[in-house]
Image: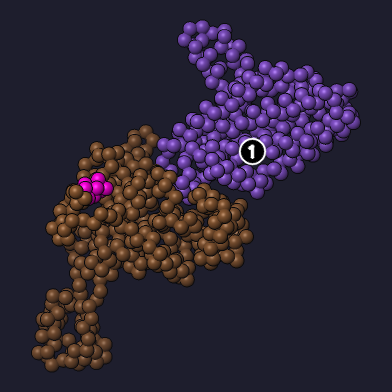
Chain colours: A purple, B brown
Amino acid sequence: MSRVASIASNTFREAVRDRVLYNLIGFALLMVAASLLVGQISMNIERNVVINLGLTAVSLFGLVIAIFIGIGLVSKEIEKKTLYTILSRPVRRWEFILGKFGGLVATLVVNTFFMAIGIFAAVFYLAHHFQRADSYLLVALYFIILQFVMITALALLFSSFSSPLLSAVFAFALFIIGTFAQDLRGFASLTHGVIGWIAIAAAYVVPNFAALNVISSVAHDQPVAASLVLYNTLYALLYSAAAVAGAMLIFERRNLK
Amino acid sequence: MEQSAVPLYFLLARAPPASCGINSQCSIPFVTSLAHFALHIIVTGPLPTFVAMPAIETFGLEKTYTVGFWRKRPRCALLPLNLAVEEGEVFGYLGPNGAGKTTTLKLLMGLMFPTAGCAKILGREVNDPQVKAQIGFLPEQPYFYDYLTARELLEYYAQLSGVGTRARSRRVAAVLERVGLRDVAGVQLRKFSKGMLQRVGIAQAILHDPKVVFLDEPMSGLDPIGRREVRDLMESLKQEGKTVFFSTHILSDAEALCDRVAVLHKGELRGIGVIADLTSSVRGKVEVIWQGGVIPPAIHALSPECHLIGAMARAVVDENQLDAAIDALRRANLKLVSVTPVRATLEDYFVEKLSPAEVAAR
């Protein structure tokens, strides 16, 4: 396990030194601008606008990082042959995959943590105090992190057999489809016969990001049901575990040319 | 009782593993080991209880790629390879570019999977973590995480190799000193030159004090001083009793360093042996120099290579025609100055192994 941790911490260090966290500066500027400007043009819904904007920005910034680093996690190491000096040590291939995955998830969690501070600062700036509904923001942020975990796992899965560019396209496409997963399930329930089976299967294979998106309800100060937190946690973990396991299985047999 | 147990152990130790039993090539080392065994019994009597195991062994190791998108066709990168490298040996793996050297190394490192056959390092399967802890590998044209400093990189690798926390910084410092990078240990690798990266590569290969070191083209991209330093380092690894397996296409390096070499061409093992034997097996020539400023016609007939250099003359003749040449000089009353065997170099052997047709035409 210490080897997995070493690989994860090196992946995190790479992200930090490659200035990935610089996106936080962009995010901070966005939050400052939002709190100062949007408050002036929207009547009494400043809080709603700032939360919506802030959480959506957290989600998109993280998504871009998850996909663009995720697709290169393995392929970059193969291309630059750094993997050769790792796998010629007592490191199992699955340990490498798990370490890379853990490192990127850690990067995203740290990144989200700093962005969350930004959102809370903006909310505090508008109301000059915290209220109970602000804690719902934490749930929304937790769900966003679960989305990052899933999308990282998918990017890793695609990059274990495809080129970086195609992996990025696949991962991004799945994110878009997954955002409309509820609609897809609705369509599937209207179909019959063989097509019905295929449609239902497709609807359930696609990651359900719709269920993980509680941004608008949180922005309207509505609490999130505890059962949803539980189900979403289980769903995201199982889905990610399946994707990472798939990546491991594919990578286990891969010839490194 | 003990004596009857020993041969059994020996056969078990050298028998091909069950996983490659389907391959007919595998039986070759087994049969040779049987023959060796019989010979050993005849010559030296019963075996000692401990029999040294080869450090690296391949049994019909073979790799075929499929190329093409629509019409897939196989391309053989490595024909069945049977090789045994003894412990403590410096083994040169020679061949021109594209001969299959790197493929072999990747198969040995478990980076690729063989199409058939198998390989063992220190008597175990190549993917066994216990084996991996005892080998070091320098890939061809190495590239490392350039956002790390040399020290950070080596500490990371030491962690992965299972070097304990307390020993780690000591080992890293020692190895940095050994490859001459102590002063730049805190510099990010993106600022390193190619030669310095090669040193980092060697440092990471020997960092965890491995028993077997694999070096893929260790001299490539180095200036003459760097090459000499690598050569010295390999010498010192040999002194420490390590097994060194290195691939190269630079023959003088192999000649200076190796106990044995193997020559590979187009994926096929063309020859293997002790350097002295290989080079002496190439037809010997002798250089004859005499004083007098004349070349007798008999010498002309023997040698196409005759020159007059002022009062001296020089001819290169075949070894078996040396007596005839000396007789001819005596008859002409010329004074013999020197007779020097023109030692065949590994290069000659290399050329001979690479193009049999050309050699036949000579």
Residue range in magenta is B5-14
Element type at mark 1 = helix
Q: Position of residue A179 (x, y in %)?
A: 64, 22
Q: Position of residue B153 (x, y in %)?
A: 56, 54
Looking at this view, is A143 or B308 the one in front? A143
Q: Toward which corner of the image does residue A133 lie, by quadrant? A: top right
Seen in the picture, residue B313 relative to B131 is either above or below; the reply is below
Residue B44 is drawn in which quadrant?
Answer: bottom left
Q: Is B161 one of the magenta-colored residues?
A: no
Crowding around mark 1 (Cα neighbors within 10 Å: few <14, some 14 to 19, many 20+) is some
Q: Is residue B270 left or right of residue B135?
A: left
Residue B216 is at least partly visible in this image: no
The residue lying furthest to the front in this view is: B1
Q: Is residue B12 visible?
A: yes
What amino acid is labelled 1 in the image?
Ala
Residue that appears at 77% across and 30% down: A54
Looking at the picture, tell me which residue is in the foreground, A213 or B234: B234
| Residue under pointer 1 | A106
Would you say A217 lies left or right of B319 here? right
Does the magenta stretch mainly form a helix, a strand or a loop?
A: helix
Q: Quadrant of residue B344?
A: bottom left
**Place of residue B76 in the rendered image (x, y in percent of width and height, measured from the top left):** 30, 44
Q: Position of residue B160 (x, y in %)?
A: 52, 48
Tell me: residue B212, above or below residue A205.
below
Residue located 64% across and 38% down the image: A106
- Between residue B325 and residue B63, name the one nearer to us: B63
